[in-house]
Each structure stands twice: as structure tokens, then as C-alpha cells.
Amino acid sequence: MMNDHSKDLKPSPTTEQVAPPLAPPLAHDANHPRAAAESKAKPSALARTLRGAFKLILPVLVIAAGGFVAWQMVASKPEVNRRPPSEKSYAVEIKAAAPAALQPDIILYGTVSAARPVELRALVSGEVVWVNPNLQTGQIVDSGEALVRIDPFDYEGAVREAEANLREAEAQLRSSEVSLESDKVALGRLKEQLTLAQNDLDRAETLAASGSLTQQALETRRLTVSQRQQSVESRQFNLEVLASQIEQQKANLERLDWRLEQARRNLANTTLNAPYRGLVQSKSVELGRSVSGSDTLVSLYDPDEMDVRFTLSDAQYGRLTTQGATLIGQSITVNWQLGEQVRPHQATITRITPEVNAANGGIEVYARLEPDAGLRAGTFVELLVPDQVYENAISIPQAAIYGGNRVYVNEEGRMAPRDVKVLAYLGDNALIDGAAFKEGAQIVTTRVAEAGPGLKLVVPAMEEKRLEEGSKSGEVDAADKGRAPQ
């Protein structure tokens, strides 16, 4: 029926053609099966409103129910009896005040150094032709032991040449000395001839005065005396020249003798020997190397003469030298730490540097170790230097001192302050004057950040002792109760 009516409807030429709605007519038809199903599926407005209200109210109900349950739990909890606040106590350690004369040790640190180090240089130039197989770093060489030899060929030739020159000069000197002696004898003969000629002249003058001798004969004799006089003077001059030449030859002989000695010494220096028994610290020489006089070949030191170098501050030096005391000759203890093992050695202070070290403001001191100490150069060691004697002193940790001059004592479980005089600071400890303490006073040695008068203290060591004594007393009582009556 509906299909037939739709065929009769024609669109208006002036309006848009629209498909006829089919669903609304179906909805109005209650008897149609599809319309009835859609009517059941579509909720009503009231149902939608109730559903939205339920979604809003449900969280509020849950929160309210949780709050009610929590309130019931708090309201129904049993009451607990609170403890009254207790006073805070501090566990500390104590030390009984027992003043005494103390001589502590100043703990210092130093370095071992060689007292007799030496660098052996090549004394002559040349090629190394032999090296001692024992010349190795860390080895001991004996005094006078040959270490290195340099090619001696040139130096042996220099010795031979110097010896030849010396023998030649000695021969010339002997020849000159023989000539000198010969001329001295000849001079004596000439003087005798001069004397005879002079006597003959005197007689001739006497005869000439009496007319017995002609004037020509007299002049002849005078000429003879003059000739003899000239010969004597010439011979004397020759003797002086010859004596001067001999002196020159002697001087030249001494020079040639020194050159021979120098040549022999250079020859001996081709062998480098150890000056004393020493420990080889380093070597820089190998076979075939060409060396000169400026090359260091071997470094060694005497292992039996070792020093410890350390530094004293101005305050420490002042204490150790108070009242005219001297450091020279004072014994100290040197501790060598080898893992967990400590090897103590003794040393004696031998010298003090004349100047203050500009780097650290201290005074460097050297102490000689005992022989055969076995310490090598460069070893870092701990030193115990005896300090001055302090009378009526007590040693406590530095941490137990507050404000530089105050400590606390334990009086009936409470802290009580005592002002003290600090005598010396020794590493982590300090010495204080014991005059501020009564006999049996208990000095608190533990650092307490809230330290103050009246602070409550607990001494664990005393508590443990008290508990042990109580335990022993209980055991004795139990034993007495269990003992059968006699």
C-alpha cells in the first residue's frame, strides 16, 4: 500500500527532491515488530537521570564510609600509657688524673741519605776496554777494587817518553857538573901561575931599581902577570856561567821529573778504582764507550755511614734546647715500617744546619745511623726524639680539650669543667698541668659535641665492671644457698 502511494508523488519542479523518511512512520506503528524492539531498547529520560545521579553519589558514599571506619578505629583504640621523657646521656671514656714527671717523644718523619756519596768520573780520556762484571746497581764493591779500565796505550807511551827526556836531562846535568869541577881545578892552577908571576915581577922591580935589570925585562914580567890575571878572571867568569847553566838544568830536570810523574799517574788513572767499600747507586759505562774527564761513570756511597735528615719546628727546637741543652750527641730512635713489621734503629744527632729552611721555616737536623743498619738512601722513616721532661703532667687526647684550655671531669655521672694549662702538644695527644685536678679525678677523654656543665654521662667500662661484679656476687649467693648446712 505504501509503495503504491509513493509512486503517485511527483517532485515539484521548484523544490529539491528528498527521499521520504521511512523510520518515523515505523516508529508510530506499534504493531510493527521492529518498532517494538527499538522502543524497548531506548531508555527513558528518568532512567538516564537516575543513572547519572548514582554515578555522582557513589564516590561520596565510598569516601564517607571510609572516613567513618577510620573514625571508629581511632575512637575504639586502647589507650597506651606514655612514658615520661627521659634525660639523654652520653657514653664516654675516662682517664684517672695521675700527674707524673713525663718525658714524651716527639714524633717526626725524615729521609735516609748517604753521609759519604761519591761520583766517580773518568780521570783520563780514552776507550773503555774493561768493565768489572760485579759493577751493577745495588752491588757492594770493596775498597780499591778495579771498576773500569781505559785503553792505556797512549799513556804508556807518554811514560816512556817522559823517562827518556828525564834521563837525557840527567846526563846533561852530569856533564855540566864535571865541566864545572874541571874548570875549578884549572882556576886553581891559573891562580898559582898568577902568584908565581907576581913574585917574579916583584924581584924584577927590585933588580931594576938597583940597575941590575933592564927596563924591557921588567915590562916583560909585568905583561906576564897581566896575562895570568886575565886568565884567572876569564876562568872565574866561565865558572859562573857554567854554574848558572847547571841550575837551569836542575830546574829542567825537576820539570821533566814532574812530567814523568804525571805520565805515570795518568797511566794509573786508566784504571778506575773504588775509593772505599761502597754500594753502587748507578753506573753509566759500557765496554767500548769513549769517555772523557767530564763523564760520570759510577755513583756509590758507603752503606755503613748513613744519615737521617729531618726538620724541627721553631717551637720544637726551642723546647729541646731549653736551659742550655744541646742536641749534638743526643740519641734518637728510627723506626723503619716494613708492612706490618717495624724495625727500630738507633741514631745519634751529629750536626745541625746553620740556616733556617726558607721553604718550611724549620731547622734541618742530621743524625748518624748505627753501622750495619741496613737502611738504603731515600728510605722514609719515623723518628722518636726525646722531648724535655715535664713535671706534674698528664697526657690526654687533644680532642678532650675545649677552647684551648678547658677539660671536663666526671663527677657523679655529670660533666664538670676544669680550666687547665696545656704544657705541650704531641701529635694527637697533649700534656696538661695536673695541678687543676684532685686526687682520683676522672678526666673525660671522649669528645662530646654538646659538652657542658651538668651533662649526664655513662662510662661503659665502669658499667661493665659493675655488671661483672654483680654477676659474681649473684653466683656466690647461689652457691651459698645451695651449700648443705653442716
Image (cartoon, rainbow, N blue to C red):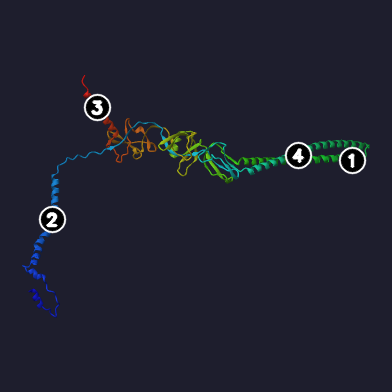
- Of the residues under marks 1 and 3, which one precedes in the sequence? 1
| Measured Cα–Cα span from mark 1 to mark 4 | 39 Å
Disc 1 or disc 4, which is closer to the eye?
Answer: 4
Q: Name the image quarter holding residue 211.
A: top right
Find the residue positioned furthest to the bottom.
Answer: 13
Q: Amino acid at mark 4?
A: Ser
- Of the residues under marks 3 and 2, which one precedes in the sequence? 2
Disc 1 or disc 3, which is closer to the eye?
Answer: 3
Which residue does the image show at 89% across and 40% down from the upper left? 220
> Dividing the image into 4 quarters, which one contains the N terminus?
bottom left
Q: Name the image quarter holding residue 395.
A: top left
Residue 340 rendering spot, x and y as whole percentages: 40, 37
Residue 385 seen in the current view = no
Which residue does the image show at 8% across and 71% down from the upper left? 25
Crowdedness near tag 4: few (<14), some (14–19) or many (≥20) residues, C-alpha within 10 Å: few
- Of the residues under marks 4 and 3, which one precedes in the sequence? 4
Label ID, residue 78: none
> Dividing the image into 4 quarters, which one contains the C terminus?
top left
- Of the residues under marks 2 and 1, which one precedes in the sequence? 2
Per the image, the residue denoted by label 1 is 220
Per the image, the residue denoted by label 3 is 475
| Measured Cα–Cα span from mark 2 to mark 1 | 183 Å
Per the image, the residue denoted by label 4 is 175
**Front-most of residues 82 and 56:** 56
Q: Secondary structure at mark 3?
A: helix
Which residue does the image show at 11% across and 59% down from the upper left? 51
Crowdedness near tag 2: few (<14), some (14–19) or many (≥20) residues, C-alpha within 10 Å: few
| Measured Cα–Cα span from mark 3 to mark 2 | 71 Å
Per the image, the residue denoted by label 2 is 58
* Horizontal side, residue 410 vs residue 26: left or right: right
